[in-house]
Amino acid sequence: MNTDMESEPWYREGLAFECTGCGHCCSGPTNGFVWVQDHEIQDLAEHVGIEDLDLFERRFVRQVGTRKSLVEYSDGDCIFLDPRTRRCIVYSARPSQCRTWPFWPSNLESPKAWGKAASSCPGCNRGRLYGLAEIRSLCKSESSTGSKSHESDS
């Protein structure tokens, strides 16, 4: 017999998260992808004060197949992660992929997957408790962009 409790995900009681600003989610050591949509590119360009979108894209965006990703430093760090302070310099205009961390489908597959994310993210399991509806909304938002940081474009 299938009950409502059995059909709910393992995180049905919610998950705690509070960004510590540590920069771990924005850094290497491996290269990956921070997928961006055109409207996010526009927002980022405005945030850094570059009116010429072509110039902004040449400096900060790379084409990966049919998609666009932010450029990274050679060590795998995001181009917008300040190497000195380890803080995001575009935090208020960051792309959806960044805004929805750590509530990505891959991190929510199981308690083990969440634990793996938490092992590199000191903000997991602390701070504000996100309810199931909010987690689903964030996860849906992330899924709609097709974002998968530090994974190939397959």
Image (spheres, rainbow, N blue to C red):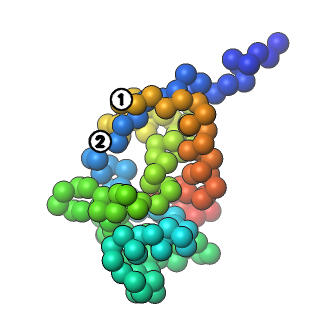
Viewer-nearest residue: 81 or 132: 132
Q: How many marks?
A: 2
Q: Residue at x 59, y 24 (%)?
A: 12
Residue 27 relative to residue 153: left or right: left
Instruction: Identify the image quadrant of the C terminus.
Output: bottom right
Determine the secondary structure under disc 2.
loop
Viewer-nearest residue: 106 or 101: 101
Q: Is residue 45 above or below residue 11?
A: below
Question: Identity of the amino acid at label 2?
Answer: Thr
Determine the secondary structure under disc 1.
loop
Residue 152 relative to residue 45: left or right: right
Residue 30 relative to residue 108: left or right: left
| Tag 2 residue | 20
Query: x%, y% of residue 150?
Result: 46, 57
Figure quadrant of residue 137: top right
Q: Is residue 148 above or below residue 1?
A: below
The answer to whether any part of residue 71 appears in the image is: no
- Closer to the chain start, of discs 2 and 1, is 2
Question: Which mark identifies residue 126?
Answer: 1
- Give how far apart the Cα atoms at labels 2 and 1 are: 10 Å
Query: x%, y% of residue 81?
Result: 29, 61
Q: Residue at x 40, y 62 (%)?
A: 93
Task: Work out which residue is located at the far top of the displayed protein and give it.
Answer: 1
